[in-house]
Image (cartoon, helix red, strand yellow):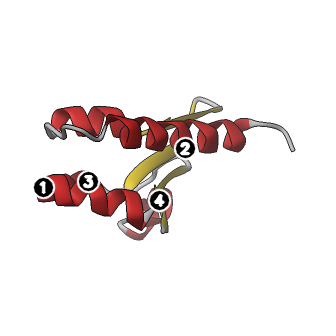
Amino acid sequence: MARIDHAKGATGAGLELPPTEELLFGEAAAGTLLMQADPAIVLDLPLRAAAWEDKGEIWLAASDPAEIGRRNGIAGKDDLLLKMRAGVDSALLKAVSPW
């Protein structure tokens, strides 16, 4: 959905930040089912992943759909949330795997 270059934004504000990017991604069908269960979950959607450099090492992290569902009290959507988590895990593994 979107890719945000926070280091570029920092430069525009006259500040420095090591390479730091945020990726926003999701699937409307899954997100809509969760929003139907609790509209407030929109604060946690779309899902996010971040990549940043720290002391020469690259780090990668992402939001956990199952944790988001738990935190928002979403009931009856465990299969969907776990499927979403598997998709996030797959995307992260693909991002760090050699070609």
Q: Amino acid at mark 4?
A: Phe
Q: Is residue 52 visible?
A: no
For mark 2, what is the residue? 87
- In this view, the residue in front, 46 or 84, is 84
Q: Nearer the viewer, mark 4 or mark 3?
A: 3
Q: Amino acid at mark 3?
A: Leu
Residue located at (12% from left, 55% from top): 40
Query: Between marks 1 and 3, how big is the CA–CA gap?
Result: 9 Å
Q: Mark 3 Cα within 10 Å, few/some/many (few <14, many 20+)? A: many
Question: SS for tag 2?
Answer: helix
Query: Between marks 3 and 2, how big is the CA–CA gap?
Result: 16 Å
Looking at marks 4 and 3 on the same chain, the residue that comes earlier in the sequence is marked by 4
Do the numbered discs 1 and 4 sit on residues whose CB atoms are within 8 Å? no
- In this view, the residue in front, 11 or 57, is 57
Q: Nearer the viewer, mark 4 or mark 2?
A: 2
Tell me, for residue 34, which label it has, or none.
Answer: 3
For mark 4, what is the residue? 25
Query: Between marks 1 and 4, how big is the CA–CA gap?
Result: 18 Å
With respect to residue 2, does 62 lie above or below? above
Q: Is residue 66 visible?
A: yes
Tell me, for residue 51, which label it has, or none.
Answer: none
For mark 1, what is the residue? 40
In this image, 71 relative to 51: left or right? left
Looking at marks 1 and 2 on the same chain, the residue that comes earlier in the sequence is marked by 1
Measuring from the top left, give residue 24's x and y in whole percent. Answer: 44, 59
Question: SS for tag 1?
Answer: helix
Looking at marks 1 and 4 on the same chain, the residue that comes earlier in the sequence is marked by 4
Q: Amino acid at mark 1?
A: Ala
Do the numbered discs 4 and 3 sit on residues whose CB atoms are within 8 Å? no
Query: Between marks 4 and 2, how big is the CA–CA gap?
Result: 11 Å
Looking at marks 1 and 3 on the same chain, the residue that comes earlier in the sequence is marked by 3
Q: Amino acid at mark 2?
A: Gly
